[in-house]
Structures are given as structure tokens and as C-alpha cells.
Amino acid sequence: MEGDRKLFGHSIPFTQSKYIYSYAVIIKAGLDFSDIDWSVEGATVTVRLPEVRILSSEIDLDSFELYLESESIFRQISIEENNEALKQLREDAETSAVVNGLLDNARSNAETILTGFLANVYDLETYKIEFKDK
């Protein structure tokens, strides 16, 4: 995060404040198990799953790491700017998690859990489980 004073669109020397820091962001993804439908036809159990989505994301305040702190007395970073930077940090973490397969992993975990539940009722050597999107 950085800020400086400007004059006619140009930065004024020695007015730059800059912070470089990091936080860990905890992101949880999954699906609503109450919205799962399933049916049995012959030896096939068809399970229809709702869309996997991000359930929550929160910044772990205990993970704070400060790498650079340089503040000018002529331009201090406001609380509003700091809050906006934290909001952007959380949004970027969510985007990165999705790109790196968070939703796919959540879907795979849900299928594994449901397979375990269904194995208690149906013999998996006889029945085949198919997962489909709703």
C-alpha cells in the first residue's frame, strides 16, 4: 500500500508513504448438503450436487508480517485506505484460491464424503455412484 502527494498530476518528492505487509486469508468453500438430490435406478445411484461456492473468507490477523514501513509526515495513509487495501487483499485471495482449484477440491471432497455415506447403505461392488451437477 502506498500514497503520496501530487501536484499537477506528478508526485511530490519526499511525500511518499509506503507499507509492504502480508496476511494469510482463510477461505472456506463447499456446498449445501441439504440441497443434494439422489436417486437409485437399477444398480446406479445418481447424486445431483448443487454448485460449489465460497462459503467464507477471513483475514487471519495473527499472521501479519510487516516487510517495509516508510511513512512521510506530509502524506499519511488513512484508515479508509487501509480498509480498502484489506478488502482488496481478501478479494484477490478468493480469486487466487479459485484459480488454484479450491472449488474443484471442495467438490472432490464432497464426493468422497458422500461416497463414504452411501457405502454404508449400498454395496459399492454392486452399485455404481454417479455424481452430476444440478
Image (cartoon, helix red, strand yellow):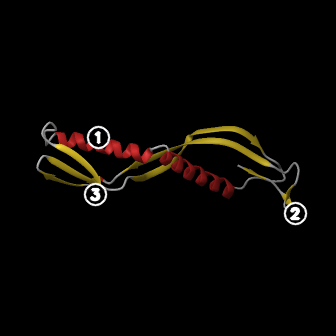
User: At numbered mark 1, what does the secondary structure look like: helix, strand or loop?
Assistant: helix
* Percent x, y of residue 67: 69, 37
Q: Which circle marks residue 35 in the picture? A: 3
* Percent x, y of residue 37: 23, 56
| Residue in the image at 59% along x and 42% along y | 23
Q: Earlier in the sequence, mark 3 or mark 1?
A: 3
Mark 3 or 1: in front is 1
Q: Which residue is mark 2?
A: 8
Q: CA distance from mark 3 to mark 1?
A: 17 Å
| Residue in the image at 29% along x and 40% along y | 112
Mark 3: few/some/many CA within 10 Å (<14, 14-19, 20+):
few
Q: Nearer the viewer, residue 92 or 15?
A: 92
User: At numbered mark 3, what does the secondary structure look like: helix, strand or loop?
Assistant: helix
* Percent x, y of residue 117: 21, 42
Mark 2: few/some/many CA within 10 Å (<14, 14-19, 20+):
few
* Residue type beneath disc 1: Thr
* Residue type beneath disc 3: Asp
Q: Which residue is mark 1?
A: 112
Q: Residue furthest bottom?
A: 8
Marks 3/2 in contact by CB < 8 Å: the verdict is no
* Residue type beneath disc 2: Phe
Mark 1: few/some/many CA within 10 Å (<14, 14-19, 20+):
few
Q: CA distance from mark 2 to mark 1?
A: 60 Å
| Residue in the image at 66% along x and 41% along y | 21
Mark 2 or 1: in front is 1
